[in-house]
Image (tube, rainbow, N blue to C red):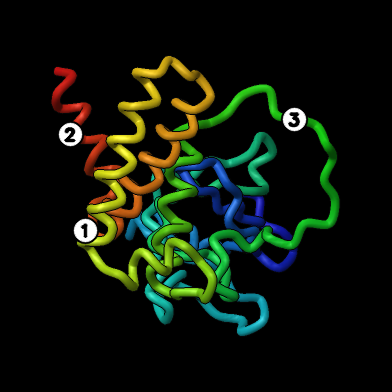
C-alpha cells in the first residue's frame, strides 16, 4: 500500500449485503494488518491518535468479507457484515445527511439489498422502540400479535391472488413479506440463515 505522509490510507467500509457505504475512515499499516488477521474492522483514529477496533465499545462490530486496494494502491475498500449501526449516532450508515437528490428513478431494484436494509430497520425499531412506529407497536404487543398479523396477511394475499388483481396482489405480498421480516427479527433468525437453508435445498 502507498500510505500518505501521515502513514495512512482512506478506508471505505461497505455493507456486503446491501452495497451501502457505511463509513469513510483511515487505516495505517497496523490496523490494516489486524483487520486481515482478525476478520474484524480495525481503523486508525486521527482524533485520538490510536488504533480503533470498530465496535469494541458499542458492540457494533463488523465481520470482514474482503479487503480490496484501488488501482493506485492508495485506498482500500473493506466489505463487511455489520453487527449493528456503523454510525456513532445510531444510524446504519455515517452517510445519512442528504444534501442533494435528483428525481431520477433507478432503472432496477436490488431486492436482496432492500430486504437486508428492511431487516436492519426492523432490528433498530425492536431495539430503540421509537414512539409512533408501527413496528415498535408490534414488538410491544409481542409474538402472538406478530403471528396474528402474519396469518391475516397470508389470507389477504391468497384472496388477492384469487381475485386476479395484480396491484392488490403485489401490495398484499409486500405486507406479508414485511410481517414475515418482523417475525424473523422477533425470533432472532437472520436472512443469512434463511439463505443458507434455501441454498441447501437447491442442491
- Which residue is at the far top? 164
Left or right of residue 175: residue 24: right
| Residue corresponding to mark 3 | 105
Q: Nearer the viewer, residue 20 or 118?
A: 118
For disc 2, the neighbor class at 10 Å (few under 14, some 14 to 19, many from 20) is: few
Q: Is residue 34 visible?
A: no
Compare marks 3 and 2 and give the one earlier in the sequence.
3
Contact (CB < 8 A) between labels 3 and 1?
Answer: no
Looking at the rendered structure, the number of numbered marks drawn on it comes to 3
| Residue corresponding to mark 1 | 187
- Which residue is at the far bottom? 48
Q: In the structure shown, which secondary structural element does the residue marked by tag 1 occupy?
A: loop
Q: Closer to the observer: label 2 or label 1? A: 1
Q: Is residue 46 above or below residue 149?
A: below
| Residue corresponding to mark 2 | 197
Compare marks 3 and 1 and give the one earlier in the sequence.
3
Amino acid at each position: 500500500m502507498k500510505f500518505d505522509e501521515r502513514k495512512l490510507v482512506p478506508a471505505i467500509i461497505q455493507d456486503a449485503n446491501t452495497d451501502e457505504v457505511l463509513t469513510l475512515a483511515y487505516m495505517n499499516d497496523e490496523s490494516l494488518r489486524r483487520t486481515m488477521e482478525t476478520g474484524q474492522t480495525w481503523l486508525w483514529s486521527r482524533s485520538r491518535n490510536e488504533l480503533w477496533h470498530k465496535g469494541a465499545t458499542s458492540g457494533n462490530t463488523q465481520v470482514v468479507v474482503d479487503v480490496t486496494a484501488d488501482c493506485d494502491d492508495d485506498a482500500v475498500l473493506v466489505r463487511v457484515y455489520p453487527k449493528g449501526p456503523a454510525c456513532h449516532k445510531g444510524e446504519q450508515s455515517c452517510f445519512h445527511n442528504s444534501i442533494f437528490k435528483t428525481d431520477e428513478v433507478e432503472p432496477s431494484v436490488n431486492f436482496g439489498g432492500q430486504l437486508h436494509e428492511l431487516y436492519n430497520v426492523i432490528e433498530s425499531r425492536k431495539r430503540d422502540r421509537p414512539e409512533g412506529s408501527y413496528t415498535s407497536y408490534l414488538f410491544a404487543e409481542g409474538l402472538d400479535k406478530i403471528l396474528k398479523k402474519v396469518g391475516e396477511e397470508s389470507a389477504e394475499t391468497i384472496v388477492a391472488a384469487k381475485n386476479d388483481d395484480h396491484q392488490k396482489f403485489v401490495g398484499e405480498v409486500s405486507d406479508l413479506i414485511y410481517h414475515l421480516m418482523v417475525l424473523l427479527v422477533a425470533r432472532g433468525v437472520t436472512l443469512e440463515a434463511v439463505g443458507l437453508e434455501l441454498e441447501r435445498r437447491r442442491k
